[in-house]
Amino acid sequence: MLNDITVVQSALSAFNNAALLAPAFLWSALLAIPLFYIVYFCAPQITSYLKWNRENFLGRTTVWTAILTMLWVVLFGGNYSVLRDNLSVLPMVTATIVFLCSLFVSSHILPHSLPHRRGIFWFCTMVFIAALALSDTHAWWGPLLQVGAFLLGVGLGYISHGKMRPIAGTILIIMMVTVAIIMQPEFFRFGQLGSLTLAHLLFVLLIGISAVATLATTNIKPSGKISMGIYIKLKWLMRVICTLGAALFILTEGVPVFIGTLVAVFISFGMSVWHSPAISEHFGDKLFAILLTTFGIVTTMPTISALGILYWTNIPPVDFWGAARRLL
């Protein structure tokens, strides 16, 4: 019989020297570069075949991102026995993610689904409910919690009078998943038995920074009302706070530090947008494409990364680096 020590030693010996130098998700992204290359240069043909255009591209991209994220959380999550803490709020967090994803998808799909597709949709829904119930069997209330969260999200999305905002709703889902990954990395097979390297933490920070930058550029209107002297002093203060917060997060891997750092980054970026007299019209969309691509890389979902690349190619050209320098 194998004891726990033997199992752990076997798991550690399974990693080769190359895997020890970089995270598994980074190697997966490198292997997916040919796919990303094809998607980027064949984007017009792909979007034409899918019948996606600038009017429906954002909605369909975000809906598929929410669907794939919900499937990833349910199917890719590990066993609750691998958690380092006996008492964990992870079941509630995953139920919240399932609720948000089902609410987002149902608010966009159900009121507008075609009659001849309803049978296929509900069949897939029943299969997913069965998988959802089996994904959380650590306690008797686990399946009830997950299935209840899914049905509640579907019901509220169906009776809602409007769709969830595509960009804001998707960012909320992505950030919930990111926080869950930081809380219990071993459950999502992130890192070596839950041990995070510098690359893991930097990519997680990149997801958060891309998310708050997208929110700042798409929700705050430029006004140019801050005087230059006050702006420079406040901007340097926020830069120092953001740098210290990022360093503290790398040292502690704490969720509160991560959230606090992103709040500081949002204030810094929001101040830059508000100070600017104008900002590129589609700069926020470009940042959202970067967010999707990065999130797909970290979660080893190349389909979401491909959606981000397609979304990038669908946006009109902008002076991205110039706008990024003004934001920083």
Image: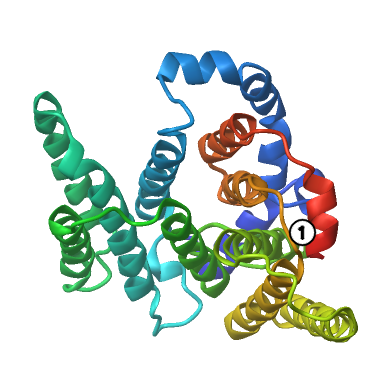
Residue 153, percent across and down?
22, 61
Binning the other alpha carbons within 10 Å of mark 1 as few (below 14), some (14 to 19) or many (20 upward) gives some
Look at the image and tell me in which quarter the N terminus lies. Answer: bottom left
Residue at x 59%, y 67% (from the top left corner): 220
Q: Is residue 247 above or below residue 6?
A: below
User: Viewed as shown, does residue 163 lie left or right of 141?
Assistant: right
User: Viewed as shown, does residue 75 lie left or right of 286?
Assistant: left
Residue 77, percent across and down?
42, 56
- Check disc 1 and report the residue beneath it: 199
Return the residue nearer the eye: 180 or 276: 276
Return the residue nearer the eye: 86 or 223: 223
| Numbered disc 1: secondary structure | helix
Residue at x 39%, y 49% (from the top left corner): 66
Residue at x 67%, y 57% (from the top left corner): 12
Residue 17, percent across and down?
81, 47
User: Viewed as shown, does residue 231 lie left or right of 124?
Assistant: right
Amino acid type at circle 1 is Ala
Residue 7, percent across and down?
55, 61
Res 282 → quadrant: top right
